[in-house]
Amino acid sequence: MVVTEALTTRKGDKPKVRPPEQDDTVRAEREGTRSPVRWVLLSVLFVVMVVPVYLLVVNAFKSQQDILNNPFSIPLSSLTFEHMSAAISSPQFNVIGGYGFTLFLVVIVDVLCIALAGPAAYAIARSLKKRTQLVLLYFLAGTFIPGAAVIIPVIYVLREIGLANTVTGLVAHDVASTLPVSIFLFVGFIRTIPVDIDHAATIDGAGRYRTFWTIIFPLMRPAVVTVLILNSIGIWNDFVSPQILLSPSSGHYTVTTAIYAGISQYSTDLTKVFPNLLLAVAPVVIFFIYMQRHIISGLTVGAVKG
Amino acid sequence: MTRGRRRARVRESAVSLGMMGPAVLLYTVMTVVPVGVAVYLSLTDWDGFSTAAFIGFDNYTHLFDEPSSTDAWYVTGLISVAGTVLMVGLGLVYALALKGKSRTNSFFRAVAYFPHVISALILGYLWAAILGTNGAVNNTLAKFGIEPVGFLFDEKFALVSLIAVIVWAGFGFNVVLFVAALQTVPAELLEAAAIDGANKRQINLRVVIPMIAPVVTVATVLDLVGLIRAYDIVVSLTGGGPAGSTQTFTYLILARSFEGTKVGYATAQAVFLMVVSAVLALLVTALRNRQDQAATGR
């Protein structure tokens, strides 16, 4: 506001130097929230971002004929739950069953990641030794590895240690892939916590582990929330690792692999496509709406610090 | 005394090692060793089943020989560069429009951002259903008597559609990132510029954007490195088609590994991709640092 005021008062006593059309757009921008440029920008944004979701929701409750003839309309009389319930109970590709397994993966990977990354980050953050700092670099190098591209050698390694095609193998791979970013964020955060706190705990007789878990870890809450959100979204949405490390014969489907198995077969039957996609998207979107502020600030922290 | 201190130091190191050990071990076995294995396999003719024979750098010398791999590089390069430019550009435009702290602004930020939490595979299927021959867009065009457009089935359009969907799904992240950075720009600075007679556009171009340049660099690196690995969305949106015109490098690598014929060759491509993405990230960061030094080091 102050800026706008300063600009308008200043404008009065300055000679015009710009051509008229340009002046118009500048003035339009200057009017701030009410400017037509901004209005157009936001309308385009709203339409482009929301219409696909609208189509997804509306068409999940229509017949193939309705979807093809009037994709945008809401035919109140002929809306049907038929295809949605068919999708829910479909034995061919079980999206609802996928929820359970995916949620299990998310929780177990989250827990193991915190259990491993927390103490490691604490040891790194509190050490002044060069070789400990090299450990941090060692982890950071992991962020350059394109996971999807080197997944085939992961199969090779899993086969050697007898974990090929097992849930344990997939969990081990997923946890390892979350470690670099988690440790990086934790180290940055722990360094902002005064060392005096650790010393006080030591004087009171606490060992390193106890100091970490009972004193430092509770102070790391913002960083822990960020890491949990990052990892959970990452694991929930992951497609390549479960698809490749768990073959369909294992009988385990995540939401993404179930969708892949189903939709790639029935892509022309839109009464199968839309309900299943809606089922796959709904939990994430509800979670997002509920946690919106945390998710956005959490993910931003990760990137701004990088 | 010294012995006691040494013993204490040894114990201290042991505890440190105990705290880092499990993480280092798991990360080494599941991430670093596979990279080593990839390097080894890339020097062999392994087909996924039989024993691998060492063939030296043959795979690497053939990296650009065959047309499908050259095409995949062209596709990957175009997606990364065009995608990054559009995502950073749109990110800046919308961040400047939405930087104020108001309810409307945070609503629109969330609207721009939401695809980021949804799996790329699912977004691809959704857009495939919308842009397909029978999709909502073509059915609407048909009502106006316009022939269906092969957004995903015509070689002329498929790559453009793919890039458009990728940008749609990704630019919101930059918006949020840039808004966070913009909110740290001190108001006095903008006021000073305004008092010196700068108009809003000049303030944005000369003051605001240079102030958030480090964050723009981060976004550029993240976008580039992310897009160079594009895979999930290709699988679900175009399946690499039509006629391979949207095959990215990662898509090619995985498709080939699955055919199970040239795993050695595919891992050579994977190793090469890894090197390229690391070099890109380091290069952009180094360029940025030099610019920063040139700006402040006078």
Image (spheres, rainbow, N blue to C red):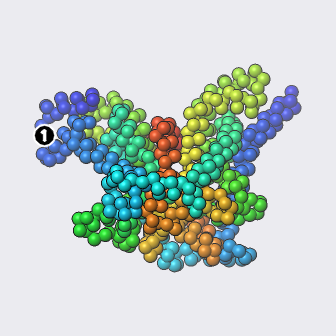
The quarter of the picture where residue B263 lies is bottom right
Identify which residue, A182 or B182, lies in the foreground: A182
Q: Chain of mark 1?
A: A
Q: In the visual, does A38 lie left or right of B79?
A: left
- Residue A263 in view of the camera: yes
Residue B241 horizontal/vertical position (percent): 45, 71
Crowd around label 1: few <14 · some 14–19 · many ≥20 (10 Å):
few
Answer above or below: position of A116 versus B31: above
Task: Determine the residue positioned at 29% across, 49% down.
Answer: A44
Identify which residue, B135 or B176, lies in the foreground: B135
Residue B298 horizontal/vertical position (percent): 41, 41
Task: Determine the residue positioned at 32% across, 69% down.
Answer: B149
Answer above or below: position of B132 versus B293: below
The quarter of the picture where residue A199 lies is top right
Q: In the visual, does B151 lie left or right of B196?
A: right
Answer above or below: position of B102 versus B254: above
Residue occupied by mark 1: A16
Q: In the visual, does A148 lie left or right of A17?
A: right
Say what amino acid the circle numbered 1 marks: Lys
Residue A82 horizontal/vertical position (percent): 46, 56
Residue B182 horizontal/vertical position (percent): 38, 38
Instruction: State which quarter of the image contains the N terminus of chain A.
Output: top left
